Image (cartoon, rainbow, N blue to C red):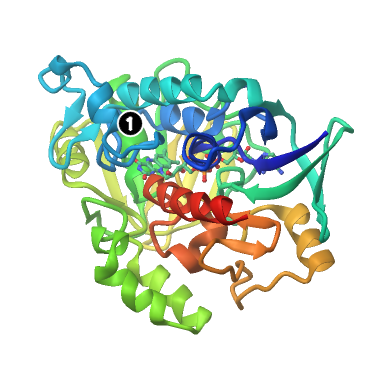
Amino acid sequence: MCLDWLVIGGGIHGVHIAARLIGEAGVAPQRLRIVDPGDKLLARWNACTVTVGMTHLRSPSVHNIDLSPFSLQRFADPGSRTAGLFSPPYDRPALSLFNTHCARVMETFGLADLHIRDRAESCSVDRDGVAVQLSGGQEITGRKLVLAIGASEQPEWPDWAPRSDLRVHHLFEPGFDGWPSSTETVVVVGGGISAAQAALRLTEEGHQVQLVSRHALREHQFDSDPGWLGPKFMAGFDREGDYNRRRKLITEARHIGSVPPEVRDALSQAIARDQLLLHEGEVEELVARREGLVLRLTTQGEVEAERALLATGFASHRPGGSMIDELIASASLPRARCGYPVVDSALRWHPRVHVSGPLAELELGPASRNIAGARRAGDRLVVAAGAS
Ligand SMILES: Cc1cc2nc3c(=O)[nH]c(=O)nc-3n(C[C@H](O)[C@H](O)[C@H](O)COP(=O)(O)OP(=O)(O)OC[C@H]3O[C@@H](n4cnc5c(N)ncnc54)[C@H](O)[C@@H]3O)c2cc1C
């Protein structure tokens, strides 16, 4: 059967876009599928957020995956506020509330039934449609493709970090099982919110924790200025026709490696209580000894631990690997010098291929990867679906 819409990626972006296409663009559910290797939709989101132990989202409740931005507020019990399910400032929802709401959205649109639990290995496009080959051997075809593949499958491993030492783990490695099962000395490497949250989780569980950040803690409420969600900054971004300069604007706008005030306060308290040691410096070498790990810093300092957890985020190169490389080659798809797609205002990379998340950031700007970016992509795709 030839479907109308194939969405590759069942994360926050793919799920939100599927809901918008069904709920607002009138796409019949039986004409849409979401391809994702997870057991359930949102598996990567759930794994990453549970691992870092975050209690509340960094973004406000209007950034949710339902059609209406106010859906999460309406969904919450009247007593939620007093129960701590919204955290000031900016009404940031508790992770548990956000996830229950996501489950409700998926149920409303019957998205679990549209989930094909498989990996897209390659895809090809022509004038008539799109064909996607799955790793299980099946081929599915459709009229339109949405690439919502995110970056969560490409954790950034620093060069000095061995991949084969069972005491060294990346928090966002698919299948992560590096959490200590008994009390240990643990070094967390990274200076952003995930490193801070993981370090705090470890202190709460009674481990001896050291945090190594290559810069002093940077405090920002959000990971980019909210002005990037509207015309304040996006008007200038849209006017910029040079994609290399757009990339520069994105890089400068992102508060990479920053923590919001409440996380910074919690870190300061843990440091004051001697539960956490903060080292400012860059790791240049990890020496793995039988009795433990030694991280040598460029500041000449050394940090010893039984376990190292990397919270170094995601690699910045274009996600999608060989599937996207081959699609680019076969369909001559345009890219900027940074390798990322050049798309039109409908996030169309090809008449039959739309993108979201990192792949859409040269069009949607610094917030493209976030939940707000999923909502912006949803807006554009609903319009595109209506016009097609
Ligand atoms: C710990 C953490 C906390 C965050 N908190 C916030 C927050 O509070 N607010 C906010 O706005 N943003 C937040 N973000 C950022 C962002 O919103 C999330 O990372 C979000 O999950 C990104 O969604 P996504 O769908 O683009 O990507 P992903 O979650 O990476 O989902 C993409 C999916 O595509 C699948 N996939 C990839 N390749 C293929 C293929 N070839 N075939 C089939 N499937 C494929 C992947 O397996 C994955 O399941 C947070 C990120 C992290 C890591």
Q: Quadrant of residue 96?
A: top left
Query: Which residue occupies 70% across, 49% down?
Result: 144
Residue 378 position in % (x across, y down):
47, 48
User: What residue appears at the point 41 percent right and 38 percent down from the top-left corner?
Assistant: 187
Q: From this view, report whether residue 358 is shown above or below residue 25.
A: below
Of the pair 102 and 254, the residue shown nearer to us? 102
- With 40 as the anchor, is 230 left or right in this view? left
- Which residue shows up at 28% across the image and 71% down it? 233
Q: Is residue 315 visible?
A: no
Q: Looking at the image, is 245 positioned above or below residue 134? A: below
Mark 1 nearby-residue class (10 Å; few <14, some 14–19, many ≥20): many
358, 208: nearer the viewer? 358
Q: Which residue lies at the image location 30% right of the left edge and 31% below the top edge? A: 71
Q: How many marks?
A: 1
The image shows residue 279 at horizontal and vertical percentages of: 30, 50
Quarter occupied by the C terminus: bottom right
Decide: is 114 above or below 298. above
Q: Quadrant of the N terminus?
A: top right
Image position, residue 346 (x, y; %): 54, 62
Q: Nearer the viewer, residue 343 or 144?
A: 144
In the shown orientation, is residue 367 left or right of residue 47? Answer: left
In the rendered structure, the answer to whether residue 93 lies left or right of residue 378 reads left
Q: Quadrant of residue 354?
A: bottom right
Residue farthest to the left, as pictured: 82
Mark 1 sits on what residue? Answer: 54
Q: Quadrant of residue 95?
A: top left
Q: Is residue 46 visible?
A: yes
Instruction: Check mark 1 vs ligand 1: CB closer than 8 Å? yes or no.
Output: yes
Q: Please tell me whether mark 1 sits on a helix, a strand or a loop.
A: loop
Residue type (three-letter) at the residue carrying disc 1 = Met
